[in-house]
Image: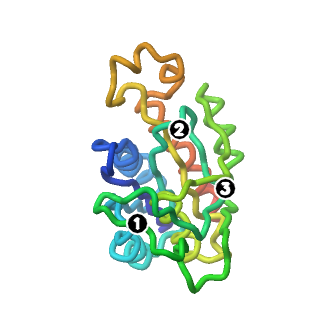
Amino acid sequence: MPRLLITGFGPFPRVPRNPSERVARAAAANPRWRRLGWQVDLRILDTRYSALETQLLPALRESDPDAVLLLGVAPKRDAITPERQARNRVSRLFPDAGGGVGDASLRLDRKDPRLIRRTQAPIAAMVRAMRRRGLRAAISRDAGRYLCNAAYYSTLSACGAARAAHVVFIHIPFPRDMTQRRRACDKSRRCKRRPSERELEGAINDCIYLLMRIAYSRNI
């Protein structure tokens, strides 16, 4: 039975309601995956650097997934953006939900000489699928320097180059119907371009299907 691990993040400073958690839960609960015979595991990660060691890596070991889809929110973006790569870098400027920051080396993994790890997942096909839904979508080459980038780099590192086609991180914008400043959003042209939460769920389901089709060789 093919297995998929989906992750989202909990709240963090200035984002007390993280839409990546809601979208990840909805995606994992989609009955379509059971009908296809897929096992879907869900982990909602604390937005803390310590969660990489205590939650993410144990989930990868326990689930041993065929594919991994990681979700995070990019509040300033209005497009859905699959990430091309993750960097072995971390910022000391943005504390996590527990007040923690990266160490003085600015490296996520000081033992790893690599600075960048890239996915080989079908992110161009994902963008095309989302645009067919009428949604704004684009490939991103900068996952930031926060927990999203850290989780992506850690997952790509743990899965190795052989499974780089089976791992993707997708940044989602704040849904227009879940904004924390609804009245201001209603007046903002940029905010109106953002997808609804339901549209996000449909887009992520398309991405899951494309990712699993690559990761699992059986005709689905």
User: Could you tell me which quadrant the C terminus lies in?
Assistant: bottom right
Q: Amino acid at mark 2?
A: Ala
Q: Nearer the viewer, residue 105 or 199?
A: 105
Which residue is painted at 36% across and 29% down in the image?
Answer: 179
Where is 92 relative to 191, above or below?
A: below
Of callouts 1 and 3, the N-terminal one: 3
Of callouts 3 and 2, the N-terminal one: 3
Q: Of all residues shown, which one is farthest toward the top?
A: 187
Which residue is painted at 43% across and 58% down in the image?
Answer: 6
Q: Quadrant of residue 211?
A: bottom right
Q: Amino acid at mark 3?
A: Arg
Q: Quadrant of residue 159?
A: bottom right
The mark lying in front, picked from 1 and 3, is 1
Of callouts 1 and 2, the N-terminal one: 1
**Residue 169 placed where, x, y %?**
55, 55
Q: Amino acid at mark 1?
A: Val
Dot label at residue 203: 2
- Would you name the residue on which mark 3 appears? 84
Q: Quadrant of residue 201?
A: top left
**Residue 149 placed where, x, y %?**
53, 60
Secondary element under disc 2, as helix, strand or loop, is helix
Dot label at residue 101: 1
Q: Nearer the viewer, residue 129 or 10?
A: 10
Which residue is painted at 39% across and 49% down in the image?
Answer: 24
Q: Nearer the viewer, residue 202 or 13?
A: 13
